Image (tube, coloured by chain):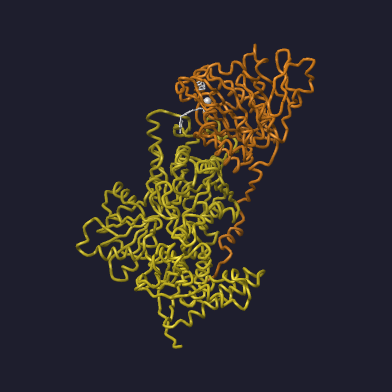
Chain colours: A yellow, B orange
């Protein structure tokens, strides 16, 4: 057979999709591991159905797992380069995301009338023109796989178990990946089940061979990333947050109590902490969100670091407890995972619509610092930063992340613990002396009150939700005192703006267009800006990690650009904040489909909007 | 102070300089005084005691106690105390809550704290009314109680904290009344040294909105007839001439006259330590006027506490964390 040269790509995104039994996650994970070992940057994003075991073959039951890989992968990737469709439903659910001219690997064994009907097709989509414009690789996976393992004389059922490795082998061929990482993994994993190991191995190799024999296809070669040196690992968003909590306990010298109530996907954190059992961290399952937050706050009152995690409507359930922490001026870190709302909304899908709730959603004037995670691994650093702020300013802190980030994974340079920030809290005040009573609400230069560990003799004091007299902490309903306390608490949080990094910019410090991102839109915006700059556009990218307070120079930076555009997975919440705080007319680029932006989508918008006729407001995506 | 001997503290040492703001004549005053005396008698240093409270008049207790204290919100006192105790097993943690809180917004939290058997102590102020909000029906209001929100008399059946908590596995249950200094001191002491969740229910007179609700149980001239003092190992006998007793017929308590044909052997002997909670549950439900109401310790048993089970390894060593950060599958790029 003639050997065509492989086509070179900078990066690509592939997506495995199928039913629960198709081992979608396994294929995705293996592909990601192998690619990371090759030196690719890798970003993984599972997309699980909302129901636990939905009916096989239906759209609601489709599992998907996307792997973006290449010289840089900071999002799951743009439009899908190759879609593996194990079923007609998988094809139907994922086809809109496939790039024009993209490849469809279709498991023809499941493209039978009964299956297309379940997926809502009334004809075979492989032959009715649905896939015109795509390159289709037809693979009767079950049949070919049965042949591949026939020498092992397994029952048909056992034989079929290895078919995902056939598909994986084909994908390895398509993108020029070696088989050894997966073969090693299989050998370790199934050392005690030699038949399984043998079958999986044969399937993997047979799939690869199937690719080699494909007429007319030469496959691709994907550039490796230049990175290092250092020790790296893959980490998903939940693990990074859990490791952040472990590191926070270590660097502060305080034990951490993490209490949470199971709610997808925040529960991943509880799972991780229970599994990892990090030294210094006590994970606890509470009976509901408010109890969880209360437990965490109780631990903080006891001198430990209290953490809790919520998702969706759970943040509202604990707003009173956050307010109590504001009044009592105690540390508390709330890690909140945003998902589509209101109420239960669309389970498992990301949104950023809880920003204003996090900033304002409590009774009374109760400002709290709000931070947001921008990528899976970034959660580690954000937790450390939240820990610094919560102890240094004696205030609850809310960390926002989203469903997509929590499940997604990327390579992470493992930090050296010794070089992580020193988070030891200020020393406890000295015991009182005659004539100098202890003042539980005395304030330091940062306006923070002392954090006294119960058990310390002489410093017994009371805190609580009733207004206090500054200094003494005695309950006070004096009008002037209340106003003073509201102002002090406000000032304490506002001045954090001077204790955080300036607004980070990529690209020129002034110009025609600034894309401003926060949270999980970071990757798509960065990708868009990189591609726009490559094609000569004068575009910059600013990213906000701190949403409240905003970095001190935010207004100055924004004013240096002719246009400021804020893509958000909400109806313009950050934009409304920027407008009200700085009277700057930023433009909102909203998307509320339960999906993250694609870099290409934003780049296309910018290309379009630079045409004069689109310069007017009323931007559409 | 030198040496290791603990200072002997008096009730005054547990008082703060705050003006107590309960209504004149409120039963909370005697609870406060007796609780201060009880704490002083425990031999615990002040700094080892933390008092967490919920809302209502009862919730003000921490402000009047010179210990560590936290006045919280409805339904939050118990989980907050659970978190505190989990983080700081070395502290003695008391929770001060009204029945309106514990049986209303905090009812779930009550059952869960009890179920976990966390080593916290609950001083449950039961005045059978929502005091601080000026006298509405509480979940403990007995059928027929007239309040501003039940003008025709309450029709919902009342919740009693002890039977509820015993059903959830409470390991220490006691009941006393605000005016009963000696018993209050005694049960607070026993609750403090009990290992596990303890509830001390205090019948507390709300002088303004439910005055005299417990007169039947506290009036010295009649209480021999209307109440029964529980004593471990002793038969359940009451009456001014100790002429009546409690007999169990199946799960039902019967009141019987002690006459020749009813031998003392038939009378139930109180046993706080029964592993099965049924008997304590039956006793805790007995309500005047059908029955005498029981005071004292209903149940005191041991089982593992949450704070013992949660053994948190200390934050070090750094090495272990470094390994954890690297995970199972790291690779090195040179
Ligand atoms: C979130 C919230 N809802 C309602 C109230 C109003 N409130 C204050 S005290 C109270 C009832 C307290 O009853 P109880 O716990 O029996 O205490 P008591 O005042 O009788 O001692 C209520 C409903 C409140 N403080 N907070
Ligand atoms: S309202 Fe009742 S319970 Fe509250 S302080 Fe007054 S008398 Fe006491
Ligand atoms: Mg009450």
Q: Position of residue B296 (x, y in %)?
A: 67, 25
* Residue A428, quarter of picture: top right
**In-front residue for pair B62/A234:** A234
**In-front residue for pair A541/A79:** A79
Q: Residue furthest bottom?
A: A2
**Where, quadrant-wise, is the N terminus of chain B in this rendering?**
top right
Q: Residue furthest top?
A: B221
> Which residue is pictured at 51% across the width and 68% down the height?
A27
The vertical placement of A190 against A450, above or below, is below
Q: Position of residue B118 (x, y in %)?
A: 62, 39
**In-front residue for pair B68/A153:** A153
The vertical placement of A59 against A318, above or below, is below
* Residue A231, quarter of picture: bottom right
> Which residue is pictured at 53% across the width and 50% down the height?
A424
Q: Position of residue B247 (x, y in %)?
A: 73, 23
Residue B306 in the figure: left or right of residue A547? right
Total numbered circles = 0
Q: Position of residue A576 (x, y in %)?
A: 31, 49
């Amino acid at each position: 057979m003639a050997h065509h040269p492989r086509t070179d790509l900078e990066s690509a995104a592939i997506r495995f999709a199928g039913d629960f039994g198709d081992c979608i996650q396994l294929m995705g994970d293996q592909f990601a591991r192998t690619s990371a070992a090759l030196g690719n940057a890798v970003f993984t994003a599972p997309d699980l159905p909302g129901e636990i075991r939905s009916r096989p073959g239906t759209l609601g039951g489709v599992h998907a797992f996307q792997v973006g890989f290449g010289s840089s992968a900071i999002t799951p990737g743009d439009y899908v380069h190759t879609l593996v469709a194990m079923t007609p439903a998988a094809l139907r659910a994922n086809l809109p995301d496939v790039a024009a001219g993209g490849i469809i690997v279709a498991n023809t064994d499941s493209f039978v009338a009964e299956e297309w009907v379940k997926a809502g097709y009334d004809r075979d989509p492989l032959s009715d023109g649905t896939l015109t414009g795509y390159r289709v690789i037809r693979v009767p996976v079950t049949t070919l796989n049965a042949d591949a393992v026939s020498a092992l004389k397994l029952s048909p059922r056992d034989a079929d178990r290895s078919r995902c490795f056939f598909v994986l082998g084909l994908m390895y061929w398509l993108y020029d990946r070696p088989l050894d990482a997966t073969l090693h993994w299989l050998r370790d994993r199934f050392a005690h089940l030699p038949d399984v190991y043998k079958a999986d191995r044969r399937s993997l190799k047979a799939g690869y061979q199937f690719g080699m024999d494909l007429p007319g296809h030469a496959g691709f070669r994907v550039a490796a990333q230049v990175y290092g040196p250092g020790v790296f690992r893959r980490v998903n968003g939940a693990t990074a947050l859990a490791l952040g909590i472990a590191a926070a306990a270590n660097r502060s010298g305080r034990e951490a109590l993490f209490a949470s109530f199971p709610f997808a996907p925040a529960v991943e954190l509880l799972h991780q902490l229970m599994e990892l059992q990090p030294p210094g961290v006590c994970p606890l399952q509470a009976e509901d969100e408010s109890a969880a937050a209360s437990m965490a706050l109780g631990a903080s009152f006891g001198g430990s670091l209290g953490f809790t995690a919520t998702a969706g409507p759970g943040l509202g359930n604990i707003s009173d407890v956050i307010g109590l922490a504001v009044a009592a001026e105690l540390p508390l870190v709330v890690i909140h995972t945003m998902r589509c709302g209101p109420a239960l909304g669309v389970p498992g899908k990301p949104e950023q619509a809880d920003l204003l709730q996090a900033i304002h959603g409590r009774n009374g004037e109760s400002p709290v610092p709000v931070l947001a995670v921008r990528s899976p691994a970034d959660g580690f650093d954000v937790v450390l930063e939240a820990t610094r702020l919560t102890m240094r300013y004696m205030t609850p802190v809310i960390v926002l992340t989203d469903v997509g980030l929590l499940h997604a994974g990327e390579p992470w340079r493992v930090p050296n613990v010794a070089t992580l920030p020193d988070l030891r809290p200020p020393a406890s005040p000295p015991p009182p002396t005659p004539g100098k009573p202890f003042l539980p609400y005395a304030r330091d230069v940062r306006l923070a009150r002392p954090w006294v560990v119960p058990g310390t003799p002489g410093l017994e004091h009371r805190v609580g939700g009733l207004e206090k007299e500054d200094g003494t902490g005695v309950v006070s309903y004096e009008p002037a005192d209340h106003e003073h306390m509201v102002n002090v608490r406000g000032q304490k949080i506002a001045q954090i703006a001077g204790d955080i990094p300036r607004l980070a910019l990529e690209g020129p410090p002034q110009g025609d267009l600034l894309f401003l991102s926060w949270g999980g839109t970071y990757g798509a915006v960065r990708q868009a800006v990189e591609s726009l700059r490559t094609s000569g556009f004068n575009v910059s990218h600013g990213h906000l990690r701190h949403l409240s307070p905003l970095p001190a120079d935010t207004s100055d930076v924004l004013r240096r650009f002719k246009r400021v555009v804020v893509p958000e997975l909400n109806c313009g919440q950050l934009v409304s904040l920027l407008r009200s705080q700085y009277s700057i007319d930023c433009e909102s680029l909203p998307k509320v489909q339960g999906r993250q932006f694609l870099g290409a989508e934003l780049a296309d918008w910018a290309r379009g909007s630079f045409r004069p006729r689109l310069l007017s407001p009323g931007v559409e995506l | 102070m030198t040496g290791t001997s603990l200072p002997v503290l008096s009730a005054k040492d547990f008082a703060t300089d705050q003006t107590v703001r309960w209504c004149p004549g409120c039963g909370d005053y005697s609870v406060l005084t007796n609780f201060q005396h009880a704490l002083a008698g425990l031999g615990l240093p002040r700094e080892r005691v933390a008092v967490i409270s919920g809302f209502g008049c009862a919730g003000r207790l921490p402000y009047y106690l010179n210990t560590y204290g936290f006045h919280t919100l409805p339904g939050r006192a118990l989980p907050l105390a659970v978190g505190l105790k989990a983080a700081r097993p070395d502290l003695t943690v008391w929770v001060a809550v009204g029945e309106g809180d514990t049986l209303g917004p905090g009812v779930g939290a009550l059952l869960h704290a009890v179920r976990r058997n966390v080593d916290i102590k609950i001083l449950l102020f039961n005045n059978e009314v929502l005091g601080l909000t000026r006298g509405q029906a509480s979940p403990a209001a007995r059928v027929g109680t007239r309040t501003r929100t039940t003008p025709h008399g309450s029709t919902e059946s009342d919740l009693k904290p002890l039977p509820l908590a015993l059903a959830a596995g409470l390991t220490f249950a006691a009941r006393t009344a605000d005016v009963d200094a000696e018993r209050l001191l005694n049960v607070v002491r026993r609750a403090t040294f009990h290992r596990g969740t303890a509830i001390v229910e205090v019948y507390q007179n709300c002088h303004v909105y439910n005055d005299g609700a417990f007169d039947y149980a506290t009036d010295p001239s009649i209480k021999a007839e209307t109440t029964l003092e529980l004593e471990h190992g002793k038969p359940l006998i009451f009456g001014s001439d100790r002429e009546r007793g409690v007999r169990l017929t199946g799960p039902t308590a019967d009141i019987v006259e002690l006459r020749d044909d009813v031998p003392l052997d038939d009378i139930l002997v109180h046993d706080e330590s029964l592993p099965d909670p049924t008997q304590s549950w039956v006793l805790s439900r007995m309500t005047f006027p059908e029955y005498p109401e029981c005071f004292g310790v209903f149940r005191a048993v041991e089982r593992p506490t949450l704070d013992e089970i949660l053994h948190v390894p200390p934050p070090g060593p750094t090495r272990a964390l470094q390994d954890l950060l690297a995970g199972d599958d790291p690779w090195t790029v040179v």
